[in-house]
Image: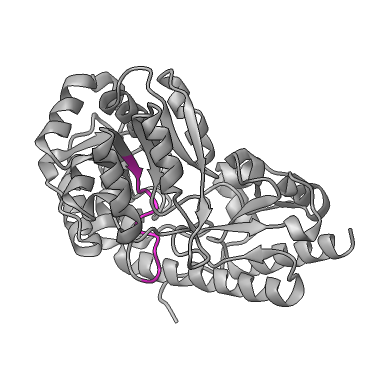
């Protein structure tokens, strides 16, 4: 039992929110796609937002202690040593990724992107006039997807000088271990490259904790920045607040020198208050949400294994996103589009994630169990009777 309510939201209540996940689909569709949660906001976070409204504090934002709160949270939960003076505010993670590519790699140098990859990552390097070197994930000895270190090294050897890392990994739900990440740091040192680690899903690990890339070795800290926010874990994306963490004086100085404040500004007063509340008072809610999401994932795994065994699904280690392999079910490459048409459920279509996405779909598990049950039933019915 939990003091928090994750079961009661109805489609009507969720549509009334007016946000992208529910507003961009027809009313007969169950949307399990956009990475928003279908849950009420954590009470301490909602109270902090209401306090801003009560005070009418809508002026220009200043650091309200968020940098210090993030440093404390990261130390307690991830063993990550963060100096609040080496944290800079951002409007969102993608802005941080884009500016980091420009700041920490030579102009025109390619960017390594493990695939399948979060869809906007296919667009961000182009904003800095960079080509992408796609390096598909491989299957490790434990049967789980992992980084192709040989492929990454080949890309570095051919001139790529930066890499976007997603940890935990969207869309596959992996939380890479320190043993998987240390060799990546060694490659970055060997080839004078830089790792831009998007760890926005870091708090969304129900068992254990996220392994922050910068925490695995001195080389990793030297050769990386960490871009994150409370927005994904506490469902605050519309409040436009994030931050980038530097781990050496050199990387901080490079950012200050190379990034104009007009390029990085945009964090909001409301977003700062909400992020602060999340990192200081939101952990009990997040623990309950993580447990609920994992229970949803286990339920889905068992339901598919018994009712639709040709659809393969591994319970994610992190994020609230699952990766469905529908190839053995005989669905087309654009399986997500097929399910929208025939089952009236909206998932993220696999090919939009690049190589490795054909015949797959990403499903959002941060939803009331009743909606997941209904969506799964529609999937089973559509595939069984196609």
Q: Magenta residues?
A: 196-207
- Could you say which quadrant of the image residue 358 lies in? top right
* Left or right of 235 in this view: 88: left
Tell me the residue at 23%/19% (across/down): 260
Tell me the residue at 32%/53% (across/down): 181
Residue 200 sits inside the magenta stretch = yes
Residue 253: give x, y in percent of width and height.
13, 28
Res 92 seen here: no
Residue nearest the observer in this picture, 164 or 58: 164
For the C terminus, the image quarter is bottom right
Residue 320: give x, y in percent of width and height.
49, 59
Q: How is the image coloured?
A: one colour
Residue nearest the observer in this picture, 352 or 68: 352
For the N terminus, the image quarter is bottom left
Residue 276 vertical position relative to residue 154 in the rendered view, above or below: below
Residue 179: give x, y in percent of width and height.
31, 60
Residue 84 sits inside the magenta stretch = no
* Left or right of 122 in this view: 222: left
- Could you say which quadrant of the image residue 112 lies in? top left
Q: Main secondary structure of the magenta part?
A: loop
* Left or right of 304 in this view: 102: left
* Labels in figure, total: 0
* Left or right of 372 in this view: 265: left
- Could you say which quadrant of the image residue 299 lies in? bottom right
Res 16 seen here: yes
Residue nearest the observer in this picture, 277 or 316: 316
Tell me the residue at 41%/30% (across/down): 111
Tell me the residue at 40%/53% (across/down): 201
């Amino acid at each position: 039992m939990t003091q928090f309510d994750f079961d009661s939201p109805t489609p009507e209540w969720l549509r009334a929110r007016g946000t992208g996940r529910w507003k961009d689909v027809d009313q007969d569709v169950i949307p399990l796609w956009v990475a928003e949660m279908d849950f009420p906001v954590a009470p301490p976070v909602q109270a902090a937002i209401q306090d801003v409204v009560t005070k009418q504090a809508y002026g220009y934002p200043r650091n309200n202690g968020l940098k210090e709160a993030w440093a404390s949270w990261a130390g307690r939960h991830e063993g990550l040593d963060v100096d609040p003076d080496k944290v800079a505010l951002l409007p969102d993670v993608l802005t941080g990724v884009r500016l980091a590519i420009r700041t920490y790699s030579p102009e025109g140098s390619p960017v390594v992107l493990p695939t399948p990859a979060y869809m906007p990552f296919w667009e961000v390097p182009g904003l800095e006039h960079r080509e992408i070197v796609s390096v598909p994930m491989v299957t490790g000895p434990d049967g789980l997807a992992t980084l192709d270190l040989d492929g990454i090294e080949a890309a570095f050897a051919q001139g790529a000088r930066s890499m976007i890392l997603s940890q935990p990994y969207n869309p596959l739900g992996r939380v890479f271990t320190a043993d998987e990440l240390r060799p990546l740091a060694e490659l970055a040192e060997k080839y004078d490259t830089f790792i831009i680690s998007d760890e926005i899903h870091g708090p969304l690990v129900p068992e254990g904790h996220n392994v922050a890339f910068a925490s695995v070795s001195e080389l990793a800290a030297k050769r990386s920045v960490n871009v994150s926010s409370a927005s994904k874990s506490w469902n605050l994306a519309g409040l436009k607040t994030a931050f980038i963490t530097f781990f050496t004086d050199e990387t901080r100085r490079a950012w200050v020198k190379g990034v104009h404040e007009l390029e990085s500004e945009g964090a909001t007063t409301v977003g700062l208050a909400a992020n602060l509340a999340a990192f200081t008072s939101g952990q009990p809610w997040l623990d309950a949400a993580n447990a609920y999401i994992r229970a949803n994932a286990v339920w889905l795994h068992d339901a598919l294994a018994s009712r639709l065994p040709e659809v393969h699904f591994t319970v994610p280690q992190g994020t609230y996103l699952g990766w469905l392999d529908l190839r053995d079910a005989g669905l087309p490459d654009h399986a997500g589009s097929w399910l929208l048409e025939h089952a009236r459920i909206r998932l993220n279509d696999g090919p939009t994630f690049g190589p490795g996405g054909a015949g797959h779909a990403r499903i959002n598990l941060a939803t009331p169990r009743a909606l997941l049950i209904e969506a799964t039933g529609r999937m089973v019915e559509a595939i069984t009777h196609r």
